[in-house]
Structure formats: structure tokens, C-alpha cells
């Protein structure tokens, strides 16, 4: 996983160094072409072939979890989403997961601006993020994708949505900064 994070950061640095900036217009061909170009460049760095499927989706395997990227010309957005936890079957544990999810969403602190949500099938909690395609460039796209992947990993590693006692966002931030007791 560290290798993937390092490669994302290296590629982002390369984009910034080269000044790669592909502005996207709001017609479907340009959106898909630009994003496929960014995925192609990322894939070259990672030794993978990455390309959006015809439905505008790509699922990235991030070592233990996956992140889906969905391009929606209709919504004018690129969506990132990933399953964080399966919801427990037992009602009391399920309610605790809902409470923890709501607390983790507060102010976007623990989610780095992304949002925790109930999956369509209502059997899991997912992390979601929407990025406007109006004036996106390659470096912004890859930076947001990298940050999203790191946020998913952090939430999954800390297992915060299934803890019995959840820290409120302020306590969590202090804990992260080693300022809490």
C-alpha cells in the first residue's frame, strides 16, 4: 500500500513538474478522453493498464479494498466511492455503526471532506466524494484521487465505525495531533 501511495505522490509531482493541465469541457467525449489520458499516464507509472469502462466506471484495486471512479457527464461530476464497512446484522451493533457514521461525518474532519453514506443496497457504509468536471486538470484529479484512497485506508485501518466508544471530531483531531490525553 505504501508503494501505491508513493507512486500516486510521485505521479502527482511529475504532473506538477511537467505542468500538465488538461481543461475539461462539458461534453462527454472530452471528459472521458481527458480522464482516460490521466489514467493511462497513471497506469504507465504503476505498470498497469487503466481505462474507464464504457459505462464511465473504473474500479481500482488498492490492496485490501477497492475504489470506484465514476464519470457522470449528466451530473457534471466525477464520483469516487469505496465500501468502508459491511453493516452488522445485529440491530444494536447496526445502530452503533449508524451513530459512529454520523459522528465521523461531522464537519468532514475525519473524512477529509468526503462523506460517509449508506450504500444503495443498505448493507454497507461507503465513503463518497464528488469532484466537479467544469475546470478540472490532471494534477487536481490525481491529487483528489490519492487523498481519497488515503482517507479510505485510514478509515479502514482505524476501524472507527465499529468502535464501541467513538471520539467526537474535536477529540479525534487532538488525538491525531498527539494533543489529547
Image (cartoon, rainbow, N blue to C red):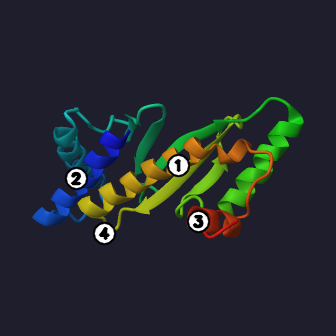
Q: Could you tell me which residue is drawn at 31 percent across and 55 percent down?
A: 142
In-image side of 1 versus 80 (left or right)? left
Q: Nearer the viewer, mark 4 or mark 2?
A: 2
Q: Could you tell me which residue is drawn at 75 percent across and 54 percent down?
A: 166
Q: Position of residue 144 (x, y in %)?
A: 38, 58
Toward the viewer: 31 or 40? 40
Q: CA distance from mark 1 to mark 3?
A: 17 Å
User: Within 10 angstroms of label 1, few (less than 14), some, or many (20 or more) residues?
Assistant: some
User: Within 10 angstroms of label 2, few (less than 14), some, or many (20 or more) residues?
Assistant: some
**Residue ID for mark 4:** 135
**Of callouts 4 and 2, the N-terminal one:** 2
**Of callouts 2 and 3, the N-terminal one:** 2
Q: Position of residue 61 (x, y in %)?
A: 40, 33
Q: Nearer the viewer, mark 2 or mark 3?
A: 3
- Element on which disc 3 rests: loop
Q: Nearer the viewer, mark 1 or mark 4?
A: 1
**Of callouts 1 and 2, the N-terminal one:** 2
The N terminus - image quarter: top left
* Residue 181 appears in view: yes
**Residue ID for mark 1:** 154
User: Within 10 angstroms of label 4, few (less than 14), some, or many (20 or more) residues?
Assistant: few
Q: CA distance from mark 2 to mark 3?
A: 28 Å
**Residue ID for mark 3:** 178
Q: CA distance from mark 4 to mark 2?
A: 23 Å
Amino acid at each position: 500500500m505504501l508503494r501505491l501511495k508513493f507512486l500516486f505522490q510521485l505521479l502527482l509531482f511529475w504532473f506538477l513538474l511537467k505542468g500538465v493541465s488538461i481543461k475539461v469541457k462539458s461534453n462527454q467525449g472530452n471528459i472521458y478522453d481527458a480522464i482516460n489520458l490521466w489514467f493511462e499516464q497513471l497506469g504507465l507509472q504503476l505498470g498497469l493498464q487503466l481505462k474507464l469502462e464504457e459505462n464511465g466506471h473504473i474500479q481500482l484495486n488498492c490492496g485490501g479494498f477497492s475504489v470506484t471512479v465514476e464519470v457522470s457527464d449528466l451530473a457534471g461530476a466525477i464520483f469516487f466511492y469505496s465500501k468502508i464497512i459491511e453493516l452488522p446484522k445485529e440491530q444494536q451493533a447496526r445502530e452503533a455503526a449508524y451513530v459512529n457514521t454520523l459522528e465521523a461525518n461531522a464537519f468532514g474532519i475525519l473524512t477529509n471532506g468526503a462523506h460517509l453514506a449508506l450504500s444503495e443496497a443498505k448493507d454497507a457504509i461507503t465513503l463518497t466524494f464528488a469532484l466537479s468536471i467544469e475546470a478540472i486538470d490532471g494534477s487536481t484529479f490525481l491529487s483528489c484521487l490519492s487523498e481519497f484512497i488515503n482517507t479510505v485506508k485510514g478509515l479502514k485501518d482505524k476501524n472507527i465505525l465499529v468502535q464501541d466508544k467513538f471520539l467526537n471530531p474535536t477529540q479525534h483531531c487532538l488525538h491525531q495531533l498527539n494533543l489529547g490525553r
